[in-house]
Amino acid sequence: MLILGTAGAGYLWYQHLNNNLETDDLNLGDHRAPEPTPNAAGQTPLNILLIGSDARDSKENQKLGGAKETFGGTPLADVQMLLHVSADRTNMSVISMPRDTLLSIPKCTDPDDGKVYEASAQRTMTNQTLGRGGPGCTVATWEKLTNIHINHFMEVDFSGVVSMADAIGGVPVCVDANIHSRDSQGHGSGLKLEEGTTAVKGEQALQWLRTRYGFDGGTDISRAKAQHMYMNSLVRELRNNANLSSPNKLRRLAETATNALKVDDGLGSVKKLYDLSNELKKVSPERTTMTTMPYEYVGARVIPKPGDAEQLFRLVRDDISLDGKGKKKPAKEKASDDPAADDGEIAVQVQNGTRMDAEPPVSGRASAVTQILAGKGFTKTAADMTTALAQEKTVIKFPSADLEGDAQRVAKSLGMKLSSVKKSTDVSGVTLIVGADWREGNTPPKSKQDDKTPESAEALNGSDKKACMHVDPKFTWK
């Protein structure tokens, strides 16, 4: 009777935790980035989008998050971090996107009421994605921008951050001077800390994650750096804090976490979250790299920095570690199993992507490359005169597997690597986008691939215990 009763209680508690979890659809857009190719051992990378919501939809969140008039307002995705775990589980990379980033948000459909949010007509702040049907629209926006296949998302709100920090028992953070994040106009999170290292928890932990006024620069970029420091320290605490061996503390943490999180259906049970945690803990802090998406300013906002941002996204897509360790040998290019049609039967559309930030597109470039291909026997090639894109490097896209062989045949005829051939649902047929690297001449330039993490990503190693936020002198106190 005692054994059965204990087993029954355990089962009920397990079901209780499952019922705590709130789930939502993973991707609300029309586009999905292609799944990565498994490595030789059959392993694939794992990509999880972490979303911090500023929702004011409860008394707890309202108390922590803002003024009365904001209650029940449309939530914003004020924290967005893409967590990438390598296929062999030896290293982990994190990319933060500043909430002030201006992007083209794709069309999203709310799964609850079927409401369609059309694609943004102009660049829009990325934190607005959450209000366009839910976290699945934030996922869709990331996939469109990066072409990285996202496996899962995890969303947490204000009160969730506070309760989880309490359950863990505090997270050590560091400032190089006394700080009080509050100015004469009332701006600031209210964070007040003495110089040095402090274990923050509860509301103070939330203040740390939200602080912009007070850290050097006073921007969303400095806030992202503080969030990186917090996450690195949090991981170290979870690994090293002996108190987590206490059954009561573990139960409290499980209760708190399942109440705090919204996840996609693929993580919608305690067992699935437990399995995920086992995958994540395989990576040591020494092989964890935190970065910020390279950016450049457009007025008071930012946009992805041409070149550097795509370089960072490509490293993640190709599962190349951002810490420069354990570099893989260049993969042997694999020819498609799909046989190519005769050159004269392959329809190719050519687009002009030679526009650069500092220079206009090369006039007539699509027509010129069309003539080059026609001279090589691709007589069904046509120039798209309606589009002037900004494409850093020349690429050939194809929409479906039955056109992969044709796309690779075009690449070979131009002397391009097969890695420049990409599957994409953004095109309707084999499409050659002439990039800014091929503004003149009859053949695309051959350049050696650089697998270094851009300096503009401001990489921070997960084992760095000496990292300390620099305090703006205007926000210090004695």
Image (tube, rainbow, N blue to C red):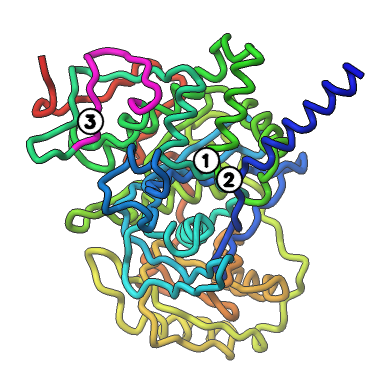
Residue 169 in view of the camera: yes
From the viewer's side, name the closer residue of 146 and 184. 184
The label number, if any, that marks residue 190 in the structure image: 3
Number of callouts = 3
Mark 1 vs mark 3, CA separation in Å: 29 Å
Q: Residue at x 76, y 74 (%)?
A: 339
Marks 2 and 1 sit apart, C-alpha to C-alpha, by 6 Å
What amino acid type is highlighted by mark number 3? Answer: Gly
Q: Secondary structure at mark 2?
A: strand
Q: Earlier in the sequence, mark 2 or mark 1?
A: 2
The numbered mark, 3 or 2, whose residue comes first in the sequence reads: 2
For residue 333, side relative to residue 225 (left or right): right
Q: Position of residue 383 (x, y in %)?
A: 46, 87
459 or 418, which is in the foreground? 459
Q: Which residue is mark 2?
A: 47
Question: Where does label 1 land, which residue?
Answer: 83
Q: Quadrant of the C terminus?
A: top left
The residue sitting at the front extreme is 1
Q: Amino acid at mark 1?
A: Leu
Q: Is residue 106 left or right of residue 215?
A: right
Query: In this rendering, is residue 338 above or below 65?
Result: below
- View extreme (right): residue: 1
Q: Where is residue 239? Give x, y as percent.
A: 57, 17
Q: From where the camera sits, is residue 417 visible?
A: no
Label 1: how many residues lie within 10 Å, few (<14), some (14-19) or many (20+)?
Answer: many
Report the amino acid beneath label 2: Asn
Instruction: Give the quarter of the image for residue 344.
Output: bottom right
- Which range is magenta? 188-204
